[in-house]
Amino acid sequence: MDPRTADLTTVALWEGGAAVRLAEVPLPELKPGEVLVRVRLATVCGSDRHTVTGRRRSPAPSVLGHEAVGEVVAIGPDGARAVDGHRLTPGDRVVPGVAVACGACDRCLAGRTAKCRAVRKVGHESFESEWALSGTYARHLVLPAGATLARVPDRLPDELAAPAACATATVTAVVEAAGPLGGRRVLVSGAGMLGITAVAAARDAGAAEVVVTDPDPARRGLALRFGATSARAVDEPVGLVDVAIELSGASPAVARCLDVLDVGGRLVLAGSVAPAPAVALDPERVVRGWLTVTGVHNYEPRHLGAALDLLDRTRDAVPWRELVSAPVPLDALGDVLAGPPGTAPRVAVRP
């Protein structure tokens, strides 16, 4: 019997609507391949705000949260490995991936584990299910066998590493889908957390120009500090581009991205994760212009490792700390989720 079964941990239990309360619950005995992680720092993704306000459906009660960095406390029988093949040991600092896939269905075998037919997700599971401690708004998190875990580089601060679990890894997948960016003209539509991250990633990948569009002047200013060559309001002209990355999810923005693609251009859609008005597509222009339109939702395990590499490689050159606020305690989470967005794209929570 695992001696921790008598131990308790604290979770922020979301009960529907704006109701969030702290609860003490027992830590489970670990099954083969499971990993117990102590959460060092979590960050609040906008999708969790959408859950609380009713824009996104999620089971209640549950422990929300899917962006975090933590420390391995214990590992179940048979052990577990990180995405780099390293055999995990207690004390390792890690970032968990969002998706837990079966690894055996047709989608997993085709390399689309994020779309596994039996996918489970960190911070998306019912508290009344077998995976009660699935979210990062807690002092401890249990990762099932087969979960993605990436080790954090020693010199990378928690504040930079935590968003890699969702925002940075998703952007890494988006940049991969965009193809080689060396010397290319890139448009980033939307300067939220993903958009700002995409600016830095595109510049790191060698883009010659990165134009950002967003209605918010403060966000446009932030984009310039992250390497954008220009930042414009949504009604200002941007010229032709080789690659457009759409992260706002607004249908007019999607249409505009299509309009500014040069011959051979590629549009990567990643912000359209909720119902929105349809966008007209001129098939003749796609054919004659050799245009490509592709979508990215979530990411694969390799993207999480690449995201941490990006953050570590650029930690001194890019002002990543501006994206994350000073941490608040776990008992302030309800106010954060139900309240207005902060001045930084991410609010940090230190359980």
Image (cartoon, rainbow, N blue to C red):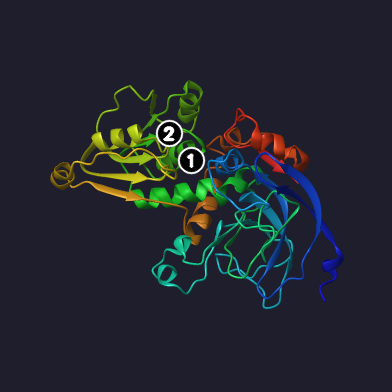
Q: On the rendered structure, is 50 left or right of 208?
A: right
Please say if the residues under marks 2 and 1 sit with CB atoms less than 8 Å apart. Answer: yes
Q: Dividing the picture into quarters, in which one does residue 263 lie?
A: top left
Q: Where 78 sits versus 257, above or below?
A: below
Q: Where is residue 49 in the image (x, y as percent from the top left)?
A: 59, 39
List the residue tagged with mark 1: 194
Q: Position of residue 182 (x, y in %)?
A: 33, 44
Q: Where 27 sits versus 269, above or below?
A: below
Please tell me which residue is depicted at 53% across the width and 57% down the height of the picture: 305
Q: Dividing the picture into quarters, in which one does residue 151 lie?
A: bottom right
List the residue tagged with mark 2: 190
Residue neighbourhood size for the residue with mark 2, other residues' Cα within 10 Å, grouped as few (<14), some (14–19), many (≥20): many
Please tell me which residue is depicted at 35% across the width and 36% down the height of the picture: 251
Q: Dividing the picture into quarters, in which one does residue 271 lie?
A: top left
Q: Nearer the viewer, residue 162 or 181?
A: 162
Q: Position of residue 107 (x, y in %)?
A: 41, 67
**Amino acid type of the residue tagged 2 in the rendering:** Gly
